[in-house]
């Protein structure tokens, strides 16, 4: 089969490799589409993992083969694939910190080499632990593979929305109107809150409004906190979701979030970044700083419901489609997006 093999920093090799062989409890999925995630791009561009590996984890496809001990699944079924499932027994899992679980971190779907998602290939193998614990999600007949590939990123965003305790009637600032920021806007609106968005690109500011933002501004606007103050009756927003790794965006969030509000870090900053902050700002204004990484096992069914029942329009996020052989070109576009670049999908 064909796969895009990570051979080193910024080195992707389109290669012929063996189709993964199955253990009795495993399932082989033929990949129909896989989303290109910012985390994939970081793994390709920076020395975070030893090669060789095959990345890609926002996967939807068709079951091509099943191990002899697998029950409840049939060849030909259409499925969305969750690439991580926690153990549900460790201290992290018992405290609902599923993404900190060692099993969650270390057992993944794979197309070969060190298990790393494996979606950037013709076929991906789903380990028995993931098969047996809800990592395959049947796709309804009326839902496309493209839509189904959004179940995993929807879960990640939904986890952040829940962690920030966003409630009906609140106002939420979303910094960055890329594909993740746009999904945040959709979810904020779906749960009855109002979204204000910022971005650097005029086209993305317009896109934010089109998917449901109450207002959208240029992130460079020096009057941004004042404008947000006007929109919120002088209070500031209840929650800020940082969907871009920007120090400036963080300080805008401090200036724009009300007393007693929350700022949630969703985007991953470069490791060398350190943000100086006077702790009395947090103490006196009772601002909560929160981090949200990856998905939540508890939200898996709700995420599938939101996508499969089209409660948000994930199709509106798709801008580009690339064949697997052109993954490197897709990564370059994602790094330097055009005004109309949002979510990029990859097809074997």
Image (cartoon, grey):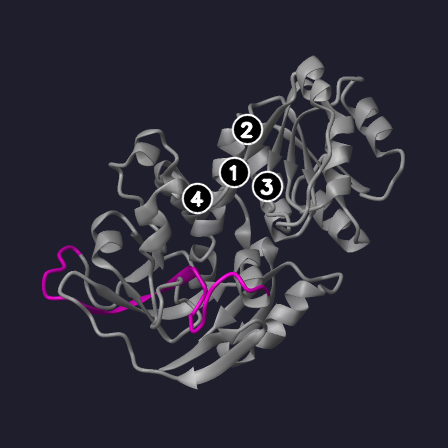
Residue 140 shown left or right of residue 280 in the figure: left
Please give the residue where the numbered disc 3 appears in the rendered image.
184
Quadrant of res 328: bottom right
Within 10 angstroms of label 4, few (less than 14), some, or many (20 or more) residues? many
Within 10 angstroms of label 1, few (less than 14), some, or many (20 or more) residues? many
Relative to 327, residue 94 above or below? above
Question: Mark 4 or mark 3, which has the lower sequence index?
Answer: 3
Q: Is residue 248 visible?
A: yes
Q: Position of residue 174 (x, y in %)?
A: 67, 38
- Distance (Cα) linking label 3 and label 1: 13 Å
Cβ atoms under marks 2 and 1 closer than 8 Å? yes
- The secondary structure type at the circle numbered 3 is helix
Question: Mark 3 or mark 2, which has the lower sequence index?
Answer: 2
Relative to 304, residue 53 above or below? below
Foreground disc of the pair 4, 3: 4
Q: Is residue 140 visible?
A: no
Within 10 angstroms of label 2, few (less than 14), some, or many (20 or more) residues? many
- The secondary structure type at the circle numbered 1 is loop
Residue 297 is a magenta residue? no
Cβ atoms under marks 3 and 1 closer than 8 Å? no
- Name the foreground residue: 114 vs 21: 114
- Distance (Cα) linking label 4 and label 3: 14 Å
């Amino acid at each position: 089969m064909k796969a895009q093999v990570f051979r080193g920093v910024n080195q992707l090799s389109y290669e012929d490799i063996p189709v993964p062989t199955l253990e009795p409890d495993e399932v082989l999925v033929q990949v129909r589409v896989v989303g290109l995630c910012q985390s994939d791009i970081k793994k390709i561009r920076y020395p975070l993992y030893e090669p060789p590996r095959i990345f890609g984890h926002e996967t939807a496809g068709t079951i091509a083969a099943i191990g002899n001990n697998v029950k409840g699944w049939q060849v030909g079924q259409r499925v969305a694939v969750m690439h991580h499932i926690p153990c549900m027994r460790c201290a992290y899992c018992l405290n609902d910190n599923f993404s900190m679980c060692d099993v969650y971190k270390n057992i993944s779907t794979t197309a070969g080499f060190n298990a790393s998602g494996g979606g950037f290939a013709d076929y991906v193998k789903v380990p028995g632990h993931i098969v047996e614990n809800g990592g395959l999600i049947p796709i309804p007949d009326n839902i496309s593979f493209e839509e189904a590939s959004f179940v995993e990123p929807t879960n990640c965003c939904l986890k952040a929305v829940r962690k920030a305790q966003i409630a009906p009637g609140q106002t939420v600032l979303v910094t960055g109107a890329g594909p993740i920021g746009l999904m945040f806007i959709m979810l904020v609106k779906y749960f009855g809150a109002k979204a204000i968005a910022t971005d650097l690109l005029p086209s993305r500011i317009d896109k934010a409004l089109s998917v449901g933002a109450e207002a959208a501004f240029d992130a460079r606007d020096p009057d941004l906190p004042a404008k947000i103050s006007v929109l919120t009756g002088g209070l500031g927003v209840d929650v800020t979701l940082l969907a871009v790794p920007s120090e400036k965006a963080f300080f805008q969030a401090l200036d724009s979030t009300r007393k007693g509000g929350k700022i949630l870090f969703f985007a991953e900053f470069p490791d060398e970044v350190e943000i100086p902050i006077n702790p009395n700002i947090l103490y006196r204004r009772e601002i909560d700083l929160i981090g949200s990484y990856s998905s939540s096992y508890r939200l898996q069914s709700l995420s599938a419901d939101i996508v499969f029942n089209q409660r948000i329009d994930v199709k509106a996020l798709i801008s580009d489609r690339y064949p697997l052989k052109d993954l490197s070109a897709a990564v370059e576009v994602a790094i330097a997006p055009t005004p109309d670049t949002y979510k990029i999908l990859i097809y074997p």
